[in-house]
Amino acid sequence: MLRLIVIGTLALCFLGAETLAASNPDAVAVIIGNRNYEGRVPNVEYAHRDADAVRSYIVDILGYDADNIIDLRDATKAQLETTFGNFQSHKGKLWRYIDPDGGSDITIFYSGHGVPGQSDGRGYLLPSNANPDTAELNGYPIDLLYENLGKLQARSVTVILDACFSGDSPQGMLIRSASPVFVKSEMPQTAQGMTVLTAASGSQLASWDDEAGHGLFTRHLMDAVYGAGDGNGDGRITAGEVKEYLDKKMTRAARREFGREQDASLTGSPDVVLAAATGGSFPERRALSAAPRQSLAPKIALEPRDTTMFVGAGRVNVRSGPGTEFDKVGTLPPGTEVSITGKVKNKNW
C-alpha cells in the first residue's frame, strides 16, 4: 500500500519505507524553491536556501542519486504541471523518472507561497508568475498534487511543504483587500493512508528564521532529521519524533521571536522513518552559502535630493538597490508619500 507523507510550511515529504538504506538508486525527488515572485507578490526570502538544505538531506541521509532529483527554482504553473501532471493526466516528468516496476521512493519538497482559493476554499501552491487573487485560475491545487501522486506506482511517497495557506505572509497579506482566510484542503480519496506533517495549521502564518536564513519550519525540520530528533537514541528518527521535536522547538521559537502561534500537525502513522543513522551516527550538515543580499555597488553615483513624491495609481516595488536586478523588499500602495533623498546620476526615474 502506498504511504504518502506530506511535510509542509509549504514543505512536502513522502517517506514510507520502514528502514532507510545508505543508497537508494531508484528513488526520485522533486525539490521546489519559489523565492522570486512577479508583480506585487513579496519574495519568499529563504526558499532557495530551504531547497538547498533539503536537497542535501535527500542525498546525504536518504541516499538518493543526485541525477534522480528534479530541481525547480521559481517554478511557474507550466513547470508544476509538466512535473506533476494536470487534471487530464498524472504522467508528467516525475512519472517518467520513477521505476516502472513500482520500486521508487518519492520525496517532494516545496518552499514558497501557498494561498487559498477565494471562491472554492481549496489550498493552492502559488507559482512564481501567478496572481494570488485568482488562485483558482493560475495556482496549482494541493488536492490535485495529492491525487496525481497517489496514482503513481511507487514504494512510498513523501511530501514536505514549507508554506501556509492562510493568504498571509511575513511581509503582509497576499490577497488584496482581504483579512486572513482559513483554508482546509480536503485529502483526496486516492490518498488514503497518507501521512501528513505540516508546519503551520489553520490560519497560522509560516514564520522565517532570519538568523538561520531559513523558513522556521525547515530550519527545525533539518535539525531534527540530522540527529536532534532522535528522542530515544535508537538511530532512527520517525515522523512522530519529528513532530515532538517541532512542538518543542519550532512552536516555542515562533512564540518567543514573533509572539505568534505556529504548530506542526501530523496525520497518519507516527512510525514512518524519516532518517536513520549510518555506522552509528548521522551525517554532518553541509554548510550553505550566506543568504544572498545585493547592495549598492560603489560605482553607482548618486545626486543628492530633498523632495517629496507620491505613489501613483498602481502599487510600486521597493528594492534593495536602484534596478530591477536587486531584491524586492516590499511594495507601496497608491498614494503613499515618499521622501526622496537621492537619484542615480544620468538615469531616468
Image: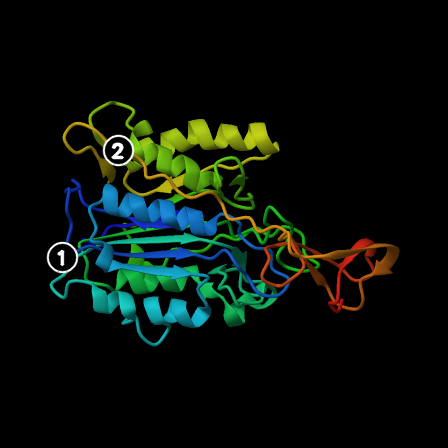
Nearer to me, 263 or 346: 346
SS state under label 2: strand
Q: Amino acid at mark 2?
A: Ile
Which residue: 41% across, 35% down? Answer: 220
The span from disc 2 to disc 1 (Cα, nearest Å) is: 22 Å
Residue 262: percent from left, percent from top: 52, 37
Q: Residue at x 44, y 64 (%)?
A: 75
**Quarter of image, res 338:** bottom right
Q: Is residue 171 left or right of residue 129?
A: right
Instruction: Bin the neighbour count of mark 1 within 10 Å (Cα to Cα): few under 14, some 14-19, many 20 and up.
Output: some
Is 156 situated above or below 80? above
Is residue 167 left or right of 214 when viewed as pictured? right
The residue tagged 2 is 237
Front residue (pair 246, 307) = 307
Residue 50: image x %, image y %?
A: 42, 47
Foreground pick, 301 / 106: 301
Q: Secondary structure at mark 1?
A: loop
Q: Position of residue 265 (x, y in %)?
A: 42, 40
Of labels 2 and 1, earlier in sequence is 1
The x, y position of residue 289, in whole percent, is 42, 44
Residue pictured at 14% horizontal, 30% vertical: 279
Residue designated by label 1? 103
- Left or right: residue 10 compared with residue 237: right
Q: Is residue 89 above or below residue 149?
A: below
Would residue 8 be visible to someone looking at this image? no
Q: Residue at x 37, y 50 (%)?
A: 12
Disc 2: CA contacts within 10 A as few (<14), some (14-19) or many (>=20): many
